[in-house]
Image (cartoon, rainbow, N blue to C red):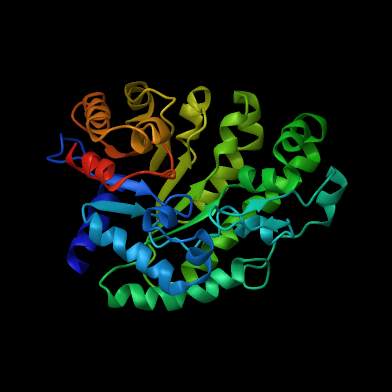
C-alpha cells in the first residue's frame, strides 16, 4: 500500500508540474471525493462520518483499498461540507443526518463588511476542530501505509458568497465595488491562512487545492477586477506546492486569464469540450476531467463511462497532459462499477 500510494502521488505530481509530452501508457485517474459521496458509498450516516473519527478513517482507507489505482484528492479531507470557512465568520450552520450541512449568510448588507476581520484558524468556527483532529487521523493513516499529501480551501468568491448570499454578492459587485473588494481581500487572506494552518499541523503536505465555482459567474471584465488578482495572490503564496484549482461552472469565457493565475491542474466542468480546453490552455496547465458527474458517472452504465473516458483521451491526442476525472466532485450515487470502468478506460 505504502509504495503504491506514494508512487501514485509522485506520478500525479510529475504530470502536474511537468506535463506528459508523450502519449502515456495509461492515463492516470483522480477523483475529488468528500462528504456528498463517501458516507453514502459506505452506507453510513453523514453525521457519523463527520463526528466519529473511526468511521471517517475507515471510509477513507476503504476507498484506497478498493480503488488502488485512483488518486483521491485532496485525500483524507477533513471537511464539514462547505462550512469550515463560513463558520469562522459566524455564519449559521444547519446540520442534517444524511447530507452535508447548509450555510446561511451572516452579513445582510455591505455595512457589515467593515466589521469583519480575518479569522484565526486555531480559534474560530469549525477550523480549530479540524486542525485538532488532523494530526490524530494522520497518525492512523500513516499506520496503514497511507499519506495526507494535499489540503484544501474554498476560494475567495465562494466564501464571500456564503457570507453575503449569492445574489447579494453579485449585486454588490456593481453597486458597492469598494466594499466588495474589501470583503474579497478578507476572504483571500482567510484562504491563505487556512491552507497554511492545515499544512503546519500535518507532516507531509506537498499540494493545495482551491475550490471556487463562483468565479465562473463573472463577466470577463468583472473576472479581471474581482477574481483574477485574488486567485493569483493565493496561488503565489505557496511556492513549491502542487496547485489544483476546481471550478465546474461555465468558465470558457475566462479560460486564458484563469490559466495564468498560478495553478498547475484545472478540474473543470463537463459543460466545456475537452478538446477546446486542451487546444486553448493545454500547453500551460494540466487538465483534470471531465466525465459528466451526474448524467454519466452517477447515473450512467459502466460502458457509458468507458466511452466518455475514451473520448476525453482521444480529444487530448492520447491523453497528453490529461488526468481522467469527473467534471467536478464525485456526486452522491457513484457506484464502484462505474469507478472501475473509469480506471479501465
Residue drawn at the location 68% of the way across and 47% of the way down: 162
Occupied quadrant, residue 58: bottom left
Relative image position of residue 295 (x, y in whole percent): 39, 30
Residue lying at 46% horizontally and 42% vertically, measured from the top left: 246
Seen at 75% across and 44% down, the residue is: 164
The residue sitting at the left extreme is 25
Answer with left or right where residue 336 lies relative to residue 132.
left
In terms of depth relative to the viewer, which is nearer, 133 or 240? Answer: 133
Work out whether residue 334 or residue 3 is closer to the camera in this orientation and state it.
Answer: 334
Looking at the image, is 98 positioned above or below residue 277?
Answer: below
Answer whether residue 239 is visible to the viewer in this image. no
Q: Position of residue 301 (x, y in %)?
A: 28, 33
- Residue 242 percent across, percent down from the top left: 38, 53
User: Would residue 22 be found to the left or right of residue 95 on screen?
Assistant: left
Query: Horizontal placement of 42 versus 248: left or right?
Result: left
Position of 197 relative to 309 (above/below): below
User: In this orientation, which residue lies closer to the viewer: 132 or 335?
Assistant: 335
- The residue at the far right in this view is 111
Identify whether 43 is placed above or below 28: below
Quadrant assignment for the N terminus: bottom left
Amino acid at each position: 500500500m505504502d509504495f503504491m500510494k506514494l508512487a501514485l502521488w509522485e506520478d500525479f505530481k510529475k504530470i502536474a508540474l511537468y506535463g506528459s509530452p508523450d502519449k502515456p501508457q495509461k492515463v492516470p485517474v483522480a477523483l475529488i471525493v468528500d462528504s456528498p459521496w463517501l458516507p453514502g458509498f459506505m452506507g453510513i450516516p453523514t453525521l457519523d462520518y463527520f463526528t466519529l473519527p473511526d468511521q471517517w478513517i475507515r471510509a477513507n482507507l476503504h476507498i484506497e483499498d478498493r480503488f488502488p489505482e485512483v488518486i483521491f484528492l485532496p485525500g483524507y479531507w477533513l471537511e464539514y461540507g462547505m462550512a469550515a470557512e463560513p463558520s469562522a465568520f459566524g455564519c449559521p450552520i444547519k446540520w442534517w443526518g444524511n447530507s452535508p450541512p447548509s450555510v446561511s449568510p451572516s452579513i445582510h448588507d455591505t455595512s457589515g463588511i467593515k466589521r469583519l476581520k480575518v479569522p484565526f484558524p486555531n480559534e474560530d468556527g469549525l477550523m480549530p476542530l479540524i486542525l485538532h483532529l488532523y494530526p490524530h487521523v494522520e497518525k492512523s493513516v500513516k499506520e496503514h501505509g497511507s499519506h495526507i499529501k494535499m489540503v484544501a480551501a474554498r476560494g475567495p468568491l465562494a466564501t464571500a458568497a456564503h457570507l453575503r448570499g449569492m445574489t447579494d454578492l453579485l449585486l454588490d459587485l456593481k453597486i458597492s465595488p469598494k466594499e466588495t473588494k474589501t470583503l474579497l481581500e478578507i476572504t483571500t487572506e482567510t484562504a491563505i491562512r487556512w491552507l497554511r494552518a492545515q499544512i503546519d499541523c500535518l507532516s507531509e503536505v506537498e499540494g493545495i487545492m482551491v475550490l471556487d465555482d463562483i468565479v465562473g459567474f463573472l463577466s470577463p471584465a468583472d473576472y479581471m477586477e474581482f477574481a483574477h488578482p485574488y486567485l493569483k495572490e493565493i496561488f503565489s503564496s505557496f511556492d513549491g506546492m502542487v496547485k489544483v484549482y476546481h471550478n465546474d461552472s461555465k468558465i470558457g469565457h475566462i479560460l486564458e486569464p484563469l490559466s495564468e493565475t498560478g495553478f498547475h491542474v484545472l478540474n473543470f466542468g463537463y459543460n466545456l469540450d475537452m478538446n477546446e480546453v486542451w487546444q486553448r490552455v493545454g500547453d500551460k496547465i494540466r487538465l483534470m476531467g471531465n466525465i459528466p458527474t451526474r448524467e454519466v458517472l452517477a447515473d450512467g452504465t459502466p460502458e457509458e463511462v468507458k466511452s466518455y473516458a475514451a473520448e476525453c483521451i482521444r480529444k487530448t491526442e492520447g491523453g497528453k497532459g490529461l488526468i481522467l476525472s469527473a467534471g467536478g466532485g464525485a456526486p452522491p450515487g457513484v457506484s464502484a462499477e462505474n469507478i472501475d470502468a473509469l480506471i479501465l478506460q
